[in-house]
Amino acid sequence: MSRYLLNLPRGFRWGYLLLVVLLGLCVGGFAEINEETTPLHLVINEIEINPAGFDTGNEWVELYNPTGKAVDLEGWQISYTYRGPETQVIATESTLIKPGEYFVYTYSGLRLTNATPGIVRLIDPEETVIDQTSPFKDEDNDEKTWQRFPDGGDPLWPDLWFFIPATQGRSNS
């Protein structure tokens, strides 16, 4: 669905998004945001795979904690697949991400592909894939990123991503 949105003029994207949200409320009812509709784990919230200028050291993944508890990122990993899984350790020592907060992991010494779609995966210390993106590519060499909307995702539309100006470390919505 998000690839379809990219072909719409900018003003129509927000109108379309509003329509999707309203339809979701009609179909799913007016659910309260609670533990049943909030993800129970960290999520990948935004990715920058082709920043303006030189890529190495400037590509990043933003994590978001939609849960009610702080999560220690020690031992967690990020992988990016396009030449096989390129896995990076997020934190080698205790690093807390509190409820409702963001954490930005910047790739160092690694250039991600821009023209070939790749998948970003979030892996916990037990090596379980906790979250992953759709295959994304970015050939624009600008300040746009792939962003989950709303932050943390929506239970009715879990794969709703937009390619819009970066909001690194801040809310996408």
Image (cartoon, rainbow, N blue to C red):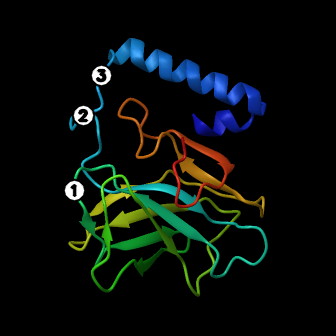
Tag 1: amino acid: Lys
Residue 21 image offset from top left, x and y in percent: 49, 23
Find disc 2 in the rendering and name its residue.
34
Graded by Cα atoms within 10 Å as few (under 14), some (14 to 19) or many (20 or more), the crowding at tag 1 reads few
Labels in figure, total:
3
Which quadrant holds residue 15?
top right
Q: CA distance from mark 1 to mark 2?
A: 14 Å
Q: Is residue 8 visible?
A: no
Tag 2: amino acid: Asn
Q: As drawn, is 27 to the left or to the right of 116? A: left
Q: Which mark is residue 31?
A: 3
- Looking at the picture, tell me which residue is in the foreground, 95 or 119: 95
Graded by Cα atoms within 10 Å as few (under 14), some (14 to 19) or many (20 or more), the crowding at tag 2 reads few
Q: Going 56% across and 60% down the picture, which residue do you hit? A: 47
Residue 112 image offset from top left, x and y in percent: 61, 73
Q: In the rendered image of this protein, does residue 92 appear above or below residue 85?
A: below
Graded by Cα atoms within 10 Å as few (under 14), some (14 to 19) or many (20 or more), the crowding at tag 3 reads few
Residue contact at pointers 3 and 2, CB within 8 angstroms: yes
Q: As drawn, is 134 to the left or to the right of 33? A: right
Q: CA distance from mark 1 to mark 3?
A: 22 Å
Q: Nearer the viewer, mark 1 or mark 3?
A: 1
Tag 3: amino acid: Ala
- Looking at the picture, tell me which residue is in the foreground, 46 or 34: 34
Sequence-first tag of 1 and 3 = 3
Give the secondary structure at mark 2. Answer: loop
Q: Which mark is residue 69?
A: 1
Q: As drawn, is 65 to the left or to the right of 21? A: left
